[in-house]
Image (tube, rainbow, N blue to C red):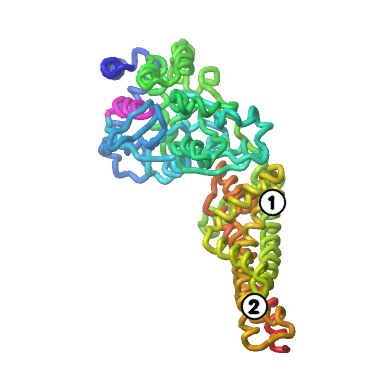
């Protein structure tokens, strides 16, 4: 849209909003004439709320609507980067959701204080009373109904789309098992991706996903189709990437806290009805070039006499249902919930164990523990094997054996472990089909080489020092005894370093818990369990290595 047209349309939008506010003010005086309209109901609700100001401003349990009127401002959580909907450039914010927020502030007669949120923080900030309202591209699903109170009617609708290179052979959910998909934390569709066997790479902000596709960090990315709409208008992006398929069509809802916001939610329900009926949502959407099909359909709904009432927002024939995102519960979910409550009642600690309450999360958790134990055992065995092989080679008198081993060790010591993992994964993918076994094998080889080369160097140096002392008989065994401390140290280091294998998609516990927290609450508890698991595992490894060290040192003493 040309600049002068944009300006003209913006003026028109403000005029329309002024007219809506003016009509609302008129209805405020004549609310009794048509008490069943959303306008009259809103006028009466605000009149009653304003009558409590300032008398109830300092009351402890006052509704958030009263607090907003007392403070003369509403704190609205909004994104900083979501093209067309909410973007921040310096001190300036723009987008569909930004203008919706400002329009709500005008309807309530208060200023708007914007607070930055993302998919992971928008619900916690409501619960912590750090924002009054979230307008942050949040899909309304049945799982979130227990966490926040959604405003009805909804203000937009989208579906999750999976985007990747045009040449990549992905066309449906059936093509996802074993593939890694870049997503944002808190996206409601993450659970469905995980249930289909996909691995997730998590980011806090959607804005980084296109760049991660371009630099090939991600081969696939999943996000709302509304987010990618702007990028597909770019010829370069459109020529390289394609929307593979979409799923999980979900209505977007503004949201308030479940506790202490009944009057605020009621006021926002009525405002949303008025905005749909009078076309303000459409006007704001047109200003920001978003798709208008849903908004036009909703305008027709809310112009119907049976919906254009003060009870329209609770009429199932008028409002859209939330997306059914209920996950299959485990057979012991009720017992887990009872245990969480028992802990909370007796300690005040809000324990959350999402990995035990739904079938997808429980499956991921069990697999994560199993594969982590395999990875740890494999890394220990590979470290010891490479230490013995490289140690013998570096302690050899043969240049043909010694110098290649030293060159390999120097290369591994100067390379970050992540780079070693990536190279090992690339080689494995070139030799074998992508699978859990090939990824685990690559991780075990990389961890074994990185730690085994260091331990092998200690063995090789011990062999040369023993030669200098004139030792000839049992040279290799004595070198192992002398290098026992270093060997044990690198075995322990190998066991501690296994979580980094998640970087190449190994389905170990860190990766599994990361996937779980992408669609469940309880991140603190979840990662505390991860810490406990690896602490116990490392303690066991330390104990076993201690026994190995004593055996080796005993051999040296006996010799």
Residue 533, picture quadrant: bottom right
Q: Which residue occupies the foreground of this view, 408 or 423? A: 408
The quarter of the picture where the N terminus appears is: top left
Q: Position of residue 27 (x, y in %)?
A: 31, 16
Magenta-colored segment: predominant secondary structure: helix
Q: Is residue 299 above or below residue 74?
A: above
Q: Secondary structure at mark 2?
A: helix
Residue 129, picture quadrant: top left
Which of the labelled discs sits on residue 366, or is there none?
1
Which range is magenta? 97-109
Q: Contact, CB < 8 Å: mark 2 with mark 1? A: no
Q: Is residue 186 left or right of residue 47?
A: right
Which of the labelled discs sits on residue 484, or is there none?
2
Residue 169 can be seen in this image: yes
Q: Secondary structure at mark 1?
A: helix
Q: Position of residue 143 (x, y in %)?
A: 57, 36
Q: Which residue occupies the foreground of this view, 175 or 13? A: 175
Ranked by sequence position, the earlier of labels 2 and 1 is 1
As measured in the structure, the alpha-carbon distance from the residue carrying label 2 to the one carrying label 1 is 35 Å
For image coordinates 72% across by 88% down, the residue present is 559
Residue 466, picture quadrant: bottom right
Any magenta on residue 98?
yes
Q: Position of residue 117 (x, y in %)?
A: 40, 40
Crowd around label 1: few <14 · some 14–19 · many ≥20 (10 Å): some
For image coordinates 60% across by 41% down, the residue present is 180
Q: Is residue 223 left or right of residue 12?
A: right
Q: Which residue occupies the foreground of this view, 507 or 56? A: 507
Any magenta on residue 384?
no
């Amino acid at each position: 849209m040309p600049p002068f047209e944009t300006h003209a349309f913006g003026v028109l939008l403000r005029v329309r909003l002024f007219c809506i506010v003016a009509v609302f003010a008129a209805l405020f005086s004549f609310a009794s004439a048509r008490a069943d309209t959303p306008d009259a109901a809103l006028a009466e609700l605000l009149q009653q709320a304003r009558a409590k100001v300032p008398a109830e401003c300092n009351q402890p349990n006052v509704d958030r609507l009263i607090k907003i009127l007392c403070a003369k401002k509403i704190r609205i959580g909004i994104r900083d980067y979501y093209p067309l909907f909410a973007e921040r450039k310096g001190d300036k914010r723009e987008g569909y959701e930004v203008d919706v927020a400002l329009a709500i502030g005008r309807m309530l007669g208060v200023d708007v204080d914007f607070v930055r949120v993302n998919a992971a923080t928008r619900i916690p900030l409501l619960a912590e009373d750090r924002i009054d309202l979230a307008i942050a591209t949040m899909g309304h699903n049945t799982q979130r109904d227990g966490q926040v109170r959604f405003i009805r009617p909804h203000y937009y609708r989208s579906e999750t789309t999976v985007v990747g290179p045009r040449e990549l052979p992905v066309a449906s959910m059936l093509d996802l098992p074993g593939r890694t998909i870049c997503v944002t934390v808190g996206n409601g569709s993450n659970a469905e991706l995980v249930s289909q066997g996909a691995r997730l790479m998590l980011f806090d902000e959607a804005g980084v996903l296109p760049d991660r596709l371009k630099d090939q960090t991600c081969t696939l990315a999943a996000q709302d189709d509304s987010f990618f709409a702007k990028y597909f208008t770019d010829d370069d992006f459109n020529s390289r990437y394609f929307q593979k398929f979409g799923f999980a069509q979900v209505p977007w809802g503004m949201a308030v806290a479940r506790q202490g916001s009944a009057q605020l939610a009621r006021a926002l329900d009525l405002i949303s009805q008025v905005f749909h009926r009078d076309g303000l949502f459409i006007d704001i959407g047109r200003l920001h070039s978003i798709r208008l099909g849903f908004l036009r359909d909703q305008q027709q709904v809310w112009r119907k006499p049976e919906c254009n009432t003060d009870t329209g927002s609770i009429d199932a024939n008028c409002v859209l249902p939330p997306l059914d995102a209920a996950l299959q519960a485990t057979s012991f979910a009720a017992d887990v919930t009872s245990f969480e409550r028992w802990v909370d009642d007796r300690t005040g600690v809000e324990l959350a164990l999402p990995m035990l309450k739904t079938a997808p999360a429980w499956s991921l958790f069990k697999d994560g523990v199993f594969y982590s134990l395999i990875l740890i055992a494999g890394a220990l065995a590979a470290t010891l094997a490479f230490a013995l092989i490289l140690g013998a080679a570096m302690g050899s008198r043969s240049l043909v054996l010694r110098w290649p081993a030293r060159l390999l060790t120097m290369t591994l010591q100067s390379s970050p472990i992540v780079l070693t993992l990536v190279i090992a994964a690339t080689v494995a993918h070139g030799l074998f089909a992508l699978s859990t076994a090939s990824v685990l094998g690559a991780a075990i080889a990389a961890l074994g080489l990185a730690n085994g080369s260091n331990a092998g160097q200690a063995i090789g140096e011990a062999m040369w020092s023993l030669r200098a002392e004139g030792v000839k008989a049992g040279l290799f065994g004595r070198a192992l005894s002398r290098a026992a401390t270093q060997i044990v140290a690198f075995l322990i280091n190998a066991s501690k370093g296994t979580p980094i294998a998640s970087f190449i998609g190994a389905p170990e516990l860190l990766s599994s818990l990361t996937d779980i927290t992408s669609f469940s609450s309880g991140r603190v508890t979840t990662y505390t369990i991860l810490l406990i698991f690896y602490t116990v595992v490392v303690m066991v490894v330390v104990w076993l290595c201690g026994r190995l060290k004593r055996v080796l040192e005993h051999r040296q003493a006996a010799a």
